[in-house]
Amino acid sequence: MFDLDRFIADCRDAVSADPSHKAVREVVARTVSEPGAILGGLGEPRCAGVEALYRGPDLTILNVI
């Protein structure tokens, strides 16, 4: 199942390792390859919108629906 805290940690680790964000792209690609797990972790969308899942000085993670 999708774990938001783990996803954020993986993305933060990736941007620390490669500031060009290429490593973050790999984390995101791996995660979105299992959309059912994401829905299980974040819940079924109820309407269109943009939600910030994480904001930091080096990285922002958005859930775009």
Image (spheres, rainbow, N blue to C red):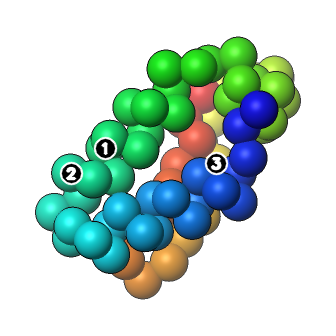
Left or right: residue 20 compared with residue 5: left
Amino acid on which disc 3 is placed: Glu
Q: CA distance from mark 2 to mark 3?
A: 22 Å
Q: Quadrant of the N terminus?
A: top right
The crowding category of the residue bearing disc 2, from other C-alpha atoms within 10 Å (few below 14, some 14 to 19, many at least 20), is few
Left or right: residue 37 compared with residue 20: right
Residue for point 73% across, 47% down: 3
Q: Position of residue 14 (x, y in %)?
A: 36, 62
The crowding category of the residue bearing disc 3, from other C-alpha atoms within 10 Å (few below 14, some 14 to 19, many at least 20), is few
The crowding category of the residue bearing disc 1, from other C-alpha atoms within 10 Å (few below 14, some 14 to 19, many at least 20), is some
Looking at the picture, tell me which residue is in the foreground, 32 or 46: 32
Q: Position of residue 31 (x, y in %)?
A: 52, 33
Residue for point 70% across, 60% down: 5
Query: Is disc 1 placed on a helix, strand or loop?
Result: helix
Asked if 54 appears above or below 39 in the picture, the reply is: below
Amino acid on which disc 2 is placed: Lys
Label 3 belongs to which residue?
51
Res 38 visible: yes
Circles 2, 3 touching at the beta carbon (< 8 Å): no
**Which image quarter: residue 52?**
bottom right
Res 47 visible: no
| Mark earlier in primary sequence (2, 3) | 2
Circles 2, 1 touching at the beta carbon (< 8 Å): yes
Q: CA distance from mark 2 to mark 1?
A: 5 Å
Q: Nearer the viewer, mark 2 or mark 3?
A: 2
Label 1 belongs to which residue?
25
Label 2 belongs to which residue?
22
Asked if 21 appears above or below 55 in the picture, the reply is: above
Q: CA distance from mark 3 to mark 1?
A: 19 Å
